[in-house]
Image: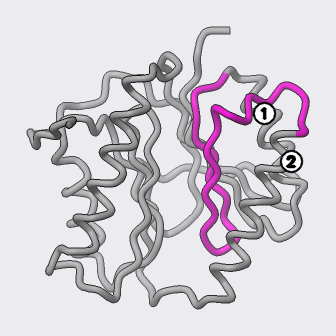
Amino acid sequence: MIQLRRIQQKPIKALLLGLVFVMTTQILTACVPIAIGTATVTAVDLYMERRTVKQSVDDNTLELRLRKEYLSDEKLGSAVNISTTIINGIVLLTGEVHNDEQRQYAEKLARSYIDTREVVNELELSGQTNMNSRANDSYITGKVKSKLVRADGVPSTNIKVVTERGKVYLLGLVTHPEAEAAVDAARSVSGVTHIVKVFEYIDE
C-alpha cells in the first residue's frame, strides 16, 4: 500500500508561464483574459515530463485520499462540494464552499501531502450547484471528451476534462500544438463558457 506523508510543501520547481485569469477567485495571480471564440481561456502553464506509471498511481492515490479527507473533515462540513483532480502532482480543486476560511483550509490540506507539487484553487464561495447544473456539466464534459478523441493532433488519453458551471478545465502533459488543438476542440462545444488550461508542456 502506498503511504502518503504530510510535509511542509516546497516551492514548485517548474516554471509558471502564461497565467491568465479573469474571475474573482485566484489561481496563482491576477492577469488579463484571452478571448477565443465564445469561451474565455485561462492558462496555467507548467513545463515538465509526461507522467510515468508510478506518477499516475501516486496521483490517483492522492486524489482518493483528499476526497475522503474533505468529506470527513469537520471544519469543512457536509454541505460543501469539493472535487479534486490531480495530474503529475498538480492538484485542481473545484466546487463550492461557504466562506474564504474553508477555501483556504481546503488548499492547506491539499498542500500538506508530500506528493502535492502545486494547488490550483478554483473553489467558489457559493451554495452547491443543483442536480440540473451538475447534469449539464457532466453532459458538457462528455461532449468535450468526445471532441478531443476525434480531433487531430490531440492526445486525448493524456488530457483530463473537468466542468464546473459551464467552465471547462483541461489538464495534462502536452506539447504547445496539442494544447491549442485541445482548446480548439473544447471551445466548439455548446454550453462552454470558459476554458482553463492547466497544462504542463513537454519538449516538442
Of residues 97 and 51, the one drawn nearer to the viewer in this rendering: 51
Check the picture and name the quadrant holding the N terminus.
Answer: top left
Residue at image coords 76%, 50%: 145
Magenta includes 80? no
> What is the quadrant of residue 74 in the picture?
bottom left
Q: Nearer the viewer, residue 41 or 160?
A: 160
Q: Which residue is mark 1?
A: 180
Residue pictured at 81% horizontal, 42% vertical: 148
The magenta span reads 150-174
In the image, residue 18 above or below residue 119: above
Would you say the residues marked 1 and 2 are in contact, meaning their CB atoms lie under 8 Å apart? no
Question: Which callout, 1 or 2, points at the residue further toward the start of the chain?
Answer: 2
Q: Is residue 167 magenta?
A: yes
Quadrant assignment for the C terminus: top right
| Residue at the (47%, 72%) spot, across then down | 95
Question: 97 and 11: which one is in front?
Answer: 97
Residue furthest to the top in view is 204
In this view of the protein, which residue sits in the foreground, 36 or 113? 113
Q: Marks 1 and 2, how far apart in space?
A: 13 Å
* Left or right of residue 17, residue 176 in this image: right
Residue beneath disc 2: 147
Tag 2 secondary structure:
helix
Q: How is the image coloured?
A: one colour
Residue 101, percent from left and from top: 22, 75
User: Horizontal and vertical percent for residue 155?
Assistant: 74, 28
Which amino acid, mark 1? Glu
For disc 1, the neighbor class at 10 Å (few under 14, some 14 to 19, many from 20) is some
Please, what is the three-letter code of the amino acid marked with disc 2? Lys
Q: Which mark is residue 106?
A: none
Crowding around mark 2 (Cα neighbors within 10 Å: few <14, some 14 to 19, many 20+) is: many
